[in-house]
Amino acid sequence: MTPAIVAHQLTRMFGKIAAVDHVDLTVQDGELFGLLGPNGAGKTTLIRMLTGLSPISSGDAAVAGVDVRRDPVALRRAISVVPQALTSDLDLTGYENLDIYARFFSVPRRERRERIQHLLERVELWDRKDDLVSTYSGGMRRRLEIARGLIHRPRVLFLDEPTIGLDPQSRHVIWELLRELQHGGGLTISLTTHYLDEAEALCDRVAIVDRGRIVALGAPAELKSALPGSDTLQLTLDAPPSQSLTDELGALPNVRKLERDAAQLTFHADGGAALLPRVIELLYAAGHKVLTINVSRISLEDVFIHFTGRSLRDTHVTETDTRRAAAPRRFS
């Protein structure tokens, strides 16, 4: 099958600044694909180009088999975009919001009713269909807008920060909805998020974008395992180990780094769980008792910092600021 999203050397310039810099990307049909990056990294500009909302400076892109530049009308019928801001009409009911959107896409009347009922039932809002959206919670409005985005049966659904500002319970309801939509088949989901736990829980693959380029791409587990010392093994002993014992432990296979702080040892290793029996054996042979053990896996946050040199929350520069900085200034 034709991939859902294909970009080749995709570039967007704002003056001399490359907001998106020669990006190559392929997203397969049925994937739930995550796009991560600090503010100003270029991910929003990339999505705007893929959805026909921002011009392409150079390169090519096709979404749902449609050339983004050559056929914008067909593109809009093949995709759906659910923006970060809540855009449902507060003065209309949930049903009316979907009905108007279906009319925009010329969905026949009888089919329109069937689709609206099916989607509202799927997002668990059928019993609130006749209530004004002004009475909905934030999580309910988000679910309504995802349903609205599916009314014309798009092939690719673009979601921008779908759970931002929601309480934990509402976030998990959205997560379950997205999993169900993907597993239903026939839909590719592109998810832009600042929540790394969200990307790790939902996405088949993620792309980390920084300074307009994709700096890492793969399944969350693959990205984590690609980093040296992907496990952290921390032990607290009954007494500080000798230097010779510390050196012996640090020389064990797959140990990337060993830190000693009084009676605490911290191993950064590949396969920390498999390393543990040998570590305990050497410690007991040297007369030590192990008081506590903690094994932890590297997180997607660690991967993000490794590739970008900063935390996802470190930057406060927005992509709008980047575009403004690139624009020529006018003086009166």
Image (tube, helix red, strand yellow):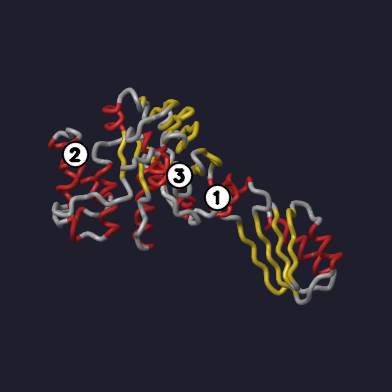
The reply to whether residue 247 is in sight is: yes
Q: Which residue is mark 3?
A: 34
**x and y percent of residue 32 in the render?**
43, 42
Pair 1/2: label in front? 1
Residue 267's disc is: none
- Please name whichever residue, 92 or 320, is drawn nearer the observer in this view of the structure: 320
Please report whichever mark, 1 or 2, sits nearer to the chain's N-terminal start: 2
Q: Is residue 264 left or right of residue 39?
A: right
Residue marked by disc 1: 304
Q: CA distance from mark 3 to mark 1?
A: 13 Å
Q: Earlier in the sequence, mark 3 or mark 1?
A: 3
Q: Which mark is residue 102?
A: 2
Q: Residue at x 44, y 29 (%)?
A: 6
Amino acid type shown at disc 3? Gly
Label 2 packing within 10 angstroms: few (<14), some (14-19), many (20+) = many
Within the image, what quadrant is residue 73 found in?
A: top left
Q: Is 271 on the left-hand or right-hand side of 224?
A: right
